[in-house]
Each structure stands twice: as C-alpha cells, then as structure tokens.
Amino acid sequence: MEALVIHSPGDLRVENIPAPAVGTGQIRVRIRTGGICGSDLHYYQHGGFGAIRIQQPMVLGHEVAGVVEAIAPDVQRVRVGDRIAVCPSHPCGTCRFCQQGLQNHCLDMRYFGSAMRMPHVQGAFRQEMVVGAAQAYPLAPGVSDAEGAMAEPLAVALHAVNRAGPLLGRKVLVTGCGPIGAMVVIAARRAGATTIVATDVVEQPLRKVAKVGADEVINVAQAPEQLARYAQDKGQFDVLFEASGNERALRAAFDVVRPRGVVVQLGLSGSELTLPFNTVVAKEFDLRGAFRFHEEFGVAVDLINQGLVDLKPLVSATLPYRDAGRAFALAADRTQSMKVILDFE
Amino acid sequence: MEALVIHSPGDLRVENIPAPAVGTGQIRVRIRTGGICGSDLHYYQHGGFGAIRIQQPMVLGHEVAGVVEAIAPDVQRVRVGDRIAVCPSHPCGTCRFCQQGLQNHCLDMRYFGSAMRMPHVQGAFRQEMVVGAAQAYPLAPGVSDAEGAMAEPLAVALHAVNRAGPLLGRKVLVTGCGPIGAMVVIAARRAGATTIVATDVVEQPLRKVAKVGADEVINVAQAPEQLARYAQDKGQFDVLFEASGNERALRAAFDVVRPRGVVVQLGLSGSELTLPFNTVVAKEFDLRGAFRFHEEFGVAVDLINQGLVDLKPLVSATLPYRDAGRAFALAADRTQSMKVILDFE
Amino acid sequence: MEALVIHSPGDLRVENIPAPAVGTGQIRVRIRTGGICGSDLHYYQHGGFGAIRIQQPMVLGHEVAGVVEAIAPDVQRVRVGDRIAVCPSHPCGTCRFCQQGLQNHCLDMRYFGSAMRMPHVQGAFRQEMVVGAAQAYPLAPGVSDAEGAMAEPLAVALHAVNRAGPLLGRKVLVTGCGPIGAMVVIAARRAGATTIVATDVVEQPLRKVAKVGADEVINVAQAPEQLARYAQDKGQFDVLFEASGNERALRAAFDVVRPRGVVVQLGLSGSELTLPFNTVVAKEFDLRGAFRFHEEFGVAVDLINQGLVDLKPLVSATLPYRDAGRAFALAADRTQSMKVILDFE
Amino acid sequence: MEALVIHSPGDLRVENIPAPAVGTGQIRVRIRTGGICGSDLHYYQHGGFGAIRIQQPMVLGHEVAGVVEAIAPDVQRVRVGDRIAVCPSHPCGTCRFCQQGLQNHCLDMRYFGSAMRMPHVQGAFRQEMVVGAAQAYPLAPGVSDAEGAMAEPLAVALHAVNRAGPLLGRKVLVTGCGPIGAMVVIAARRAGATTIVATDVVEQPLRKVAKVGADEVINVAQAPEQLARYAQDKGQFDVLFEASGNERALRAAFDVVRPRGVVVQLGLSGSELTLPFNTVVAKEFDLRGAFRFHEEFGVAVDLINQGLVDLKPLVSATLPYRDAGRAFALAADRTQSMKVILDFE
C-alpha cells in the first residue's frame, strides 16, 4: 500500500508501507479522501512548529474519509461497505483527564500524523488504514467523501464554539479566515449568532467566507477603520474567535470586544505574543484556549449528515495523492485555495 | 380609538378608550397586528389562571406590531413611519433584580395586558398605543406585520433556550406543540440542536411542528411507546423543553432524559403537579423554570429581520379585530389553529 | 469473619461470612468503624425504599474506616498499617457516563451495601473487607476512625454544595437537619456562605446544627413565621439545600428563595411530591438533584485531614457492632442521636 | 477640612478643601482610617500608571472607614453615629453594563481617587466626606476601623475569587503576595480551597502570607524548583490567581496549572507582557481578568463583621495622615510592610 511520508522539510515521498492486520475491536478502511491541514503544511514546509519537529519519517494526514473494507469479529458499530469519516483522535480512556471527560488532554493521546510523541503516531494519508471501530463515523448517503474528510476540521471549529458557550443572539468576530476560521463562521451561524464579522489580510478567503455565512468581512490590512467602528461603548462584540495566531489580530480585537466578552484562542502562532494584558484585566475578558475536540467529531458528522451545515463551498481543489507536492503548494497559497483535498483512489 | 376589553369570562367587548398623550421618551404607535396568546385565551375563557384573575376591565393583548405615528422630541431610536414590533415588557430598571440583569423578575414590572397587579396593566389590542421608545424594535422591509407580532412569543422561546445553555449538537425533546412549543423547536434548531423530537396529544399541531423543524413528532396519546424507545441507558435526551404544563408529559419525559440532563419548564399548569421527585435526585436533573424574557426580544427581532428563523408557517388565520370572538374561539381550537392573528386596520 | 447481614425488615444478624482473597490492584482492610446511614435504616426498618427492596441477604453499610492489613503486589497507593477511609463507590470507568466525568451515574456502578442491583452489592459492616486500592484514602495522624467513617456522608454534602455552584457570600437555607443536612451546613460554611439558616421539625438536631455553624435554626413545626420573614422581595435566600425529602419543607422554601435561586434537592422521599410547579416557572428556579458523589470523597478526606471541617460534634454514640439492634434503634431516634457509629473491634 | 492632595509625582500635600453639603440620598462621614493602596502609591511615585496620569490636583484614597456625622432626611440605610466602611465605587445604574449586572464596567463610573476621567474623581483621604447612602456599610461592634478600611481590597480579592468559580476542594496557586495577593489567599481559604500555595520574590510578605492561610509559600527568586515540582502530569493546580503583574510569574505558572485550569489575572503591569500563548491554546486555559468588584463590597463587610475572615494580621503600621510622606514610603517598602493604615483623627 502507498502512503505520503514526510522525511524532512520539503521531502514528502510516496512510499510503500506494510498493511497492518485487523485486531480485536478494529476495522480496516480504504481511504478515499484526505484534507490537507495547516499542521500538515507546517511539517511539509518547516518540519514542524514550535518544539514539535519531525524526528523520524512519518505518514502525514489526519482528515480522512473512506470505506470499511474489513472488521474484526467483535465489531458492531459499522459494517463492511460503510462509508465513514475517520476520527484521528485516540485517547487512552483511563488517565486522569479522560476520566474527567477532558479526553483532548489525555496523558497518553495518540493522534494520527502527529510528531508530538516518539515514536511519532503515523498518519492517514495512505491507501489503507486500520483504526479502532470507535473511530469510525458512518456518512449519510448524499454526503461526499470530501465532506467526510472535513468532519475533523469542523470538529475543531465546533469545539471552539463549545468553548465560547451559547452563541444564540450573540455578536461574533472571527479573526483569520483559513479553513478553520471559515468553519468557525459556519458553526457560529449554526449555533445562532446574529452578527458575524470576519477579518483577514487576504482578499480571497474573505470573499469565500462571505459566501458561507459571515454578515460582513473586513480586510484589516486595507481598511482597519472598518473594524474600529465596533470599538464604541468599550466594544460591540460578545465573542471573538481568534483563528489567525497573529498578534496584531488579537490586539486589534481587544478594542472591539466588550467587557466580559469571551475570547476563544484557537490559532497557534510561530512565536510568543506580546499583548496589552492590562486590557484583559480591565475589560475582564474570558480568554479561553481551544485545542482539538472530543465529542465534537460525532456532532460534526451529524451536522454534515443532516445537512445542517454546508462545507462543500470550502473545497478549492481535489488532486490525486500522487500529486501531493502540487497539492501542498496549492494549499499553501491562500490567494488560490481554502481546503485542498487529496484523492486516494 | 377602539380596543378589545375583557370584563369577565367570555365578555370581550370592542370599546372606545381615550388616546393617551405622548410623554418624554415615548412614541405613539398605530397597531396593525396582534397575536392571540394562551394567556389572552385564559382571561377570555376562565377570567385568568391560578391566583391571577381579572378584577377590573382590562384591554387584552401583548403580541403586537405597528407603525410609529408620533415621537416625543427627545426620541432618537425610531422615526415616524417606522414599522416596529412592540415589546410589552417594561421593567423599572432600578430594583434589586433589574440591577442584576434579571429584569424579568423586576419588583415593579409593567407588562401589557396583565392582571398580575392592581390596577391591571392595560394591553395592546387597540388601534393606537403610547409606549416607551425603548420598547420599539424596527422591522426589516421584507418582514410582515404578523411576523412582527410574533417577536414576543419567539422571545419567550428564545429565553427558554437560553435557560437551557448551549444546544449545539444536543438531543432535544419538546413536550407540547402549541405556539410556544413550536417556536422552541424553531429556536432549538437555530441554536444547533442535532436531534429534535416533539410530542403532543393532538395530531394537527404535531404535523405543523414537523414542518418547521422537528426531526420526529410523536403523538403520546396514541403511541407512547415511540417515546419510550428513548429510555435506554437511563435516557437519550440531553435537554427537555416542557411546554405543555401537563403532569403526564413531564412524568413521561423523566424516563427519557439522561442523567444530568436539563429540563426547562416553561409551560404553566392549572394546578399543582405530582411528580416522582426521587428521579430528579437520582438522575440529577437540572430543572429550570423559564419565565418571559428580557434581552431576547431584541434577539427575536434580529433573527426575524435577518431571515434566520421563519415563523410564517405558524400563522393559521388572520381576522379583523372586530371578529375577536370568532378569532378567540378559533385560537382555542388546537385542531384548527396554531397562531391566530388579529388585524387592527 | 463476622458481618451484619440484613435478611428482612428488622431481621439483622451477626453472621460469619468468608474472607475473600486479595486480587490484583486490591487491598484487605480491617474495618474499625462504620457509620449508620439513613439508607441502612431504611433497609432495617422497611426492607428498602421506593422500588429498591432487599431480595436476598445483604451485608449492610457503606460508611467505614479501617486499617490496611494486606495489599496486592502491584499496589502503591497505600501501605500495610495505613489508616484509611474506604470509598464505597466503584464505577466501571468505561461507560458513557464515566467517560464524561459523571461516574455517579455509571451504568454499571457497584456501591457497597446497595440492593439496587441483583445480586446485591454486599456492604462494609464487617470485620474485614477486600476493596480496590483506588477506594482507599489515608487518614492523617490526628483524625479519629469515626471521622474517617464520616468522609462518605461529608462527600454527599460536598457534592450537593458543588451542585449549587459557588457559595461565597451567598445566603443559604438548609431544610432538614439529619446528618446530611448538618454536613451541608458545615460544607456551606466552609465554602464561604455568609448566612446559613437551617430548619427542621425536631428540636434536638436543630440545637446540634446551631453548634456546627448555622447562623439561625428554625423549628418550622413550632414557628413557621420565623422562616416566612425571609419571603420579602420575592425571597431572600440564594440557595436552598433540601435534605428532608419532605413536601412541606420544599413548599415553604419556595416562598423564601429568590428568583433565579438554586434549589438543590438531595433528600429522597417515600412517595411522590405534589408541588406548585408554576412557582418554579415564575421564579425561574434552578432545581438540581444531587446524588451521591465522585471526586468529593477525596475532597472530604482532605478537608478532614487538614482540620478545615470538624465533624466530631456530630457523633452521638459509638456502640459495638454486636449491639447493632440497639445502635439502629438509637440511630432511628432523632431526639437522641445524629450520627451513630459502630465499633468493629 | 484637611485632605491629602497629590499634585505631581512625590508632591503630596495636606491641604484645606471645602466641605460639601449633604444632598438628597447622601450622608456625611467623618473619615477615621484609610488604607494605602497600590494605585495610591503609583500616583505618588510615578504620577499614575499606563495611560492614566494625574492631570490636575486630586485627593488620593479609596479604602476608608469612618463615622456617619449627618444624613439627608430621606436616608434610612444608616443612622448618625454608625461606624461604616465606605464603598468607593459609584456606578451610574442605567448604562448598558449596569443593566446587565456588570456595574464594574459602568460607562459612567465614578470611583474615588481615580484619574481615569477628567475632571478626576476626588478621593477619600480627607477628614470629612459626603457620599451616597448606598455606599455606606455598617461595621459590627467588635470590628476595628482599620478592618473597615480593608473591606475595599478584600472586595477586590473576593471578586477575583468569584471570577474563578467554585474553589471548594480546589488546588490554588497565588503569585504575588502584596496586600491583594494576601487577601486572595484568605478569600480562597474561606471559599474552601484545600491546597493554597503562594509565591513571591520577597521573603517578608511570604512569611506573612504563611500566617494567614497559605499551606506553602515559595520564594521563586531563590527556589523556583519548589514550584516546578507541581508541573507533573501537565500541572497540578486547578486555579491560578496572578496578583503580581509580573511576566515571569505568569510564565512559570503556565507550567504548573493543569489543562482547563482557570487563570485569574488581577495584577496590572507597567508594560505589555510577552507570553507563550500556544500554551494557553494547548492547555485550554480559562484566563479571566478581574477588575475591581461590585456586590463583593457588601460580602467583604459581611465576612469581616461575622468574623469569617481575619484581616488584622495584614496591618503593618498605622500612622497619622499628616505623616503621609513617611506612610507612603513605608507602604512602598515590601520588606517592611504589607498594609499601611492612615489615621485621620
């Protein structure tokens, strides 16, 4: 079977890897689609991010959908032939955090295509994969494989929205309109936000986000005053989703979020941030980190299956996995692409 | 000016009443539509509910929309000619509860068409009305007057949803499919619930509710076993909205709400309820009352104005206010009507 | 080894039972003290409560402390000779609720001395017991065995307090001054409540509760007007802990709890309750059930070990386990006793 | 009447100022004691902090207690001769934030001795003062004037504790042991924290804090490894109160606070802070600003009056107000003083 293996920055190879056997409680999946994520790009471009670096060859990828090819005798959750989204998260279930319902902080987490631990957890950009049956979420008939692959980033967005608390009737600002920011816009609309403003410094993603639900988009590189309008009375937004990891974005947002506003930080950044922390004190922000997800993966698949969200407009291009280099270059170009999908068939 | 004045059960008269002057901070509104509410019906049929009884003639009505006819010189919020929904709630702003942001518990509340205090607060089923400018919420161009009149019951439903906490991804049961129950279904969908099941004992409202967003409707008089399916593993619903005020509805729901589930009680009942309270203890329900609304009125108008909810299917009939008797009889017949609208023009 | 075995109402025998072997992850405890709980009394007096009835002989008891006599080779948490409080709760760790951090709702719970499942889970009123090492909580040097045995009911009270949310600066009413009500008073004081009023219909427990922290005690059988003073402005208490399971207690409290007040129901009752539910709606109570505990057992032991609570005044009498009949009779007499402790040595 | 008026950094004068008349709803207070706060020191040493600078002569002081000398005819809350703590906060009551119960974010706040607005709000270090009756909180007989003056900083600490949510059974870290940090320790203990560790870089305040309730104190300048012990399993503390405004304190604490831990930032800093924000994301901290207080002032007085907290050990020295220069120098020397009290009699 073939897989996309990263060896070092820029060195992404199509390689043959052995197909593992199906153990108790497991299933074998024929992968059909995979979405390229920002972290995949970081491994490809820079060999990692922050302290997390590739130290051994690793199969990339954690946003995938496919077809169940085989199941262990004890598996009841899915049947052979089912089309599924694959959840890349595999918490231990027994550690202190798992027993508190905080599985995304598991002390022994295995997450596909992540160099956080040694040996690395191999990823899902491959033709076949063996996963736990509990990681399989069946897709409804009308749902495309690409939509299935996007359940993972949608789960990230839903988790951020859950971290914010109820959004019904709230005024929401989203800074950063990459795929995650775009999905936060979609999730915030689904959760009942009445005003959604999105900002970025690149025009193309803003245009896309305007189409999937934002009431207003602002290019803060060109028209920062459009955002500054919202600063009156100590700030007009109830909730900020910061999805850019950019210090200036967060700083500008501090002025337009109201006292006791909620700031959900989900964007990671390449370096430390320097911020006017006295504003956090004086306006009593609730600043909450959002990291991955847990039960939100199932919710993401439910929302997609029921047609309660529409992610299709976010797909910019679909390329065969053997053109990975071209696909990754495209995914890295924000003027051209939002979500790039790899086709493994 | 004419108004609909209730004198005693069944004695609802079209009467001439004087038009009040416009004071500081006030506006005069020409009422165009009014929705008949369950409490209007109680006054009409029984002279009140519980300890609240009509003790003097009272203009009925608190769900209205109209056109601004005149404004005091200091008013800036609206202009003459604006089409508005009128918020019937007028808290004092200074009592202990108003200063805590709990205006719906104001110690000196004035609420249109309510016999809770003496003298009663006169209602809004009339041709003209003077209200505080802060009670006026402009309607967007495409929004009908009937939709404007329904901002009030929608606010009640939104308040119930807010009391429940976040609904994104939650499994929701709504018991009782009158206008409020129906709007809870609409609001729960808007807030991101992934499963919504609604129950009633009358077929017609169930059919209506299936059209506005419920995933499944159950006639618990005919097929209680359909609801009982959800009892497995101590209960499958995360949230119950009890909008019937019916003891049997609440009792049946206790079996299908999961431990630590949220039960929002918004239906009032004609008598005390006898309940297996040990279940509340053993399943650790969070049982929360929901009463009227405050900031949700503005949210209701926003959602209607932006087309984020569609209330139009709930209107069963529109009758001239001079046919009030017929309108009230129709509103009381659940096999024929959901929301009955009075036309004041 | 001897144990206290209930066969039917009133038929409690001292019997010889076999001593189980110590398995992996387990320890053997020599039980030194056991507290008689209300549920033990119900089994003894009535053979159970509600639908839960003794169907086979069962060792009673779940509030115990003792000394570690032996440990399995893999156990590191405690050592032979340690004095410990024994947690009677053993959730499965893997079910839906355990994985959400709601272990007290475990679908496969084993709780000492409970007839909720068949075969019953045998209890802890015995000379020796084998338990999981995770159920052992070491006691600090100065702490008595009786205090150790009271960690369990304190955990129940702490869980109720946790269900109420923060109490710092809150005005608290406790209805029902049995051992649990008394411990709620102690826990509420520890959590920072500024006003604590406790009610009962028996004088002796009220006097006791006044000594352990209540600012005011009211005998509502004799002086209901003392409680009614708190009804002004829709009610003065922020939080009610209902620990009596008595309908009249809850009904009277409805008048003195403020709108949006929190009502924690932890008392179970012998029958269904009839209540003015419209008050729950109109005052928007947050009525929350509280059932057993989970992490609170460890917190209870910490508070006792650090001297942050003092439970010693609650012990009414200590009797040898062979005088169980007398001990149970005493425990059942509220004019004579608060907490009765059995001595197993 | 004499008052302490700041003109520019270091220029603090005892000046005669006119005594204002008592208007409707007001009272005149003879000030007896005043506590020197960190912000008083900043005005004295640097002429302000951040963007807030003295632009005109201003009476300093906002932590005071005194005796009611006169009351307007309509005042019922206090009587002449009452000893009171004076709340320095006077929100407008009608703005958007006041109506949400967020009075500390009032758009038209008047806070004694603050240069935040022009003209500045004159302070309370003076012999007589006219305040609103609602700002007066009677002291219990045994409570000293100095304790009354400390109700204000205790209210700040209580507000921080309220921002953290329930502390019962929680493990708490307090960084920065000035008067506010010390009162956070006292408040956290009162609220039921089971472990309280406090850090500073100066030995004397640490010793003081160990006496008022901290279980462990760590001089992080000398023994940072003592704090680092708590980093295991992603961090052992549930809640951090950051009361130093020091970047290194916050940074070190990030390692020892557990995932989903709460970080309450109440210390202000002289400059912006540079922080590893990815840690906030990856550990999903809830980072909450805490600014002043509202209802906590009354709670502070209640706790002091009932003897539920003991602030007396925090008073380092009491000096006559005419020795203000010496008192301010002493207050600025952390090796010598915790809270310095001015005597106005």
Image (spheres, coloured by chain):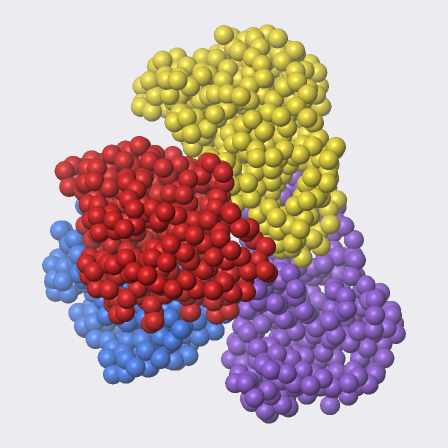
Chain colours: A blue, B purple, C yellow, D red
Q: Is residue C175 visible?
A: yes
Q: Is residue A84 left or right of residue B297?
A: left
Q: Is residue B93 left or right of residue A315?
A: right
Question: What quarter of the picture does the N terminus of chain D occupy?
Answer: bottom left
Residue drawn 36% across and 37% down? Answer: D312
Q: Is residue A40 visible?
A: no
Residue drawn 63% across and 19% down? Answer: C337
Q: Position of residue B219 (x, y in %)?
A: 72, 60
**Quarter of the rendering containing residue C243:** top right
Q: Position of residue C339 (x, y in %)?
A: 58, 21
**Quarter of the rendering containing residue A123:** bottom left
Q: Is residue D314 left or right of residue B54?
A: left
Picture layout, residue C37 above or below residue A167? above
Q: How many marks?
A: 0
Q: Position of residue A250 (x, y in %)?
A: 28, 67
Picture layout, residue B137 above or below residue D271? below
Q: Is residue B299 left or right of residue C205?
A: left
Question: Depth check: C156 or B91 in front?
Answer: B91
Residue drawn 62% across and 54% down? Answer: C259
Picture layout, residue D163 above or below residue A215? above
Residue drawn 56% across and 53% down? Answer: D77
Q: Position of residue C30 (x, y in %)?
A: 45, 12
